Image: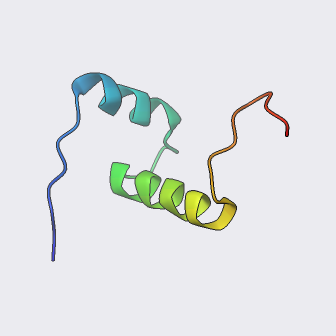
Amino acid sequence: MTQTLEISDELAERIDSHREDDETREEFLEELVTIFETEGAFLQEGYSE
């Protein structure tokens, strides 16, 4: 089943600025979810426990 997710233009631009040349927004978001599931959280640059 396919679902539609509405995002703001600003968020779309932010996503686009991080995508690889041939990567779709869906592929990029899929990768983010995989990282989150694997790591348990997103790492922030300069952050250490």
Q: Is residue 24 left or right of residue 49?
A: left
Q: Quick check: 10 above or below 33?
A: above
Residue furthest to the top in view is 10
Residue furthest to the front in view is 49
| Corner quadrant of residue 43 | top right
Q: Is residue 39 left or right of residue 6?
A: right
| Colouring | rainbow
* Residue in the picture at 68% in, 60% down: 39
Residue 20: percent from left, percent from top = 52, 45
* Residue in the picture at 60% in, 59% down: 35
* Residue in the picture at 30% in, 22% down: 10
Q: Quadrant of the N terminus?
A: bottom left
Residue 33: percent from left, percent from top = 49, 59
Residue 31: percent from left, percent from top = 52, 59
Q: Quadrant of the C terminus?
A: top right
| Corner quadrant of residue 34 | bottom right
